Image (cartoon, helix red, strand yellow):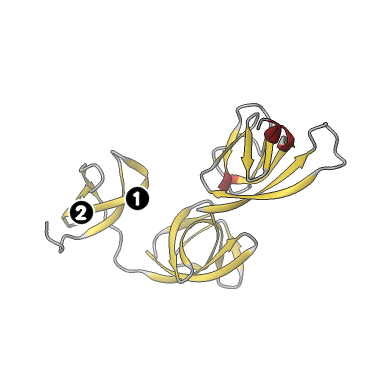
Amino acid sequence: MSDSVERVALACPACSPEAETVHEVLSPGGQATVRCTECDHVHKEALPSEETVERDVVVSQSGDSFTARTDVDPEESIAEGDEFVLESEEGIFTVRVTSVELDGDRRVEEATAEDAATIWTRAVGNVAVKVTVHPSDGGRENTYSTTVHVPGDYEFVVGESDSFGEEAFGIEGIAVRDDASGYEFEKLSYDGDDAVAKDIKRVYARDETSDAWSAW
């Protein structure tokens, strides 16, 4: 296969309708014919514009932040909750948009890349989740907070137990972040309710550390 074949990132209606995969351009034009390299599905798509604008991206991660630059199609809409892969000097990060800043320091939930001055985001590939842990005796006096570091897609489930290092706890409730979508309530408290780490503001749990150790 020739290395001159043009490749673009597009959603595939057959195998990846929600996330972009690499496609080969078989026939260019207004509605180009493309083939997904993951499943070989051939379909027609309008190709992204080759014109780009460079924008600042502020990335928040575990209480720290840094600024990078990214090239974006000027007509592309950027909205709170969108996720994209950012390549920077610090590394490659999956980030979620928290707000878009226009000229004049005005923050909005959505804007075109052409109108945006700065894209504010937080890293969601690997995240720090805050956990409030109540003592196993049912009291509140010895409640403490801890932080666990997990992949963004790590799932916490109400009614189930988790262990991290020497700590173990049973999950009693989950507070969901404001920028998370797909959840009916901001507080999950019924057994079986679940959320992924990147969508979680805080986990509420019951200490099971001594039970975990006694099992040995």
Residue 161 seen in the figure: yes
* Quadrant into which the N terminus falls: bottom left
Residue sitting at x 60%, y 73%: 104
x and y percentages locating residue 60 in the rendered image: 59, 62
* Quadrant into which the C terminus falls: top right
Instruction: Residue 185: name its quadrant.
Output: top right
Give the camera-side residue of 3 and 47: 3
- Local secondary structure at mark 2: strand
x and y percentages locating residue 17 in the rendered image: 35, 42
- Tell me, for residue 24, which label it has, or none: 2
Amino acid type assigned to the residue bearing label 2 in the image: Glu
- Tell me, for residue 20, which label it has, or none: 1
- Count every numbered label the image shows and give the total: 2
Amino acid type assigned to the residue bearing label 1 in the image: Glu
Give the camera-side residue of 13 and 141: 141
**Circle 2: is it few (<14), some (14-19), or many (20+) Cα within 10 Å?**
some
Residue sitting at x 21%, y 44%: 43
Identify the residue at the far left of this view. Answer: 1
Residue sitting at x 40%, y 59%: 76
Instruction: Residue 160: name its quadrant.
Output: top right
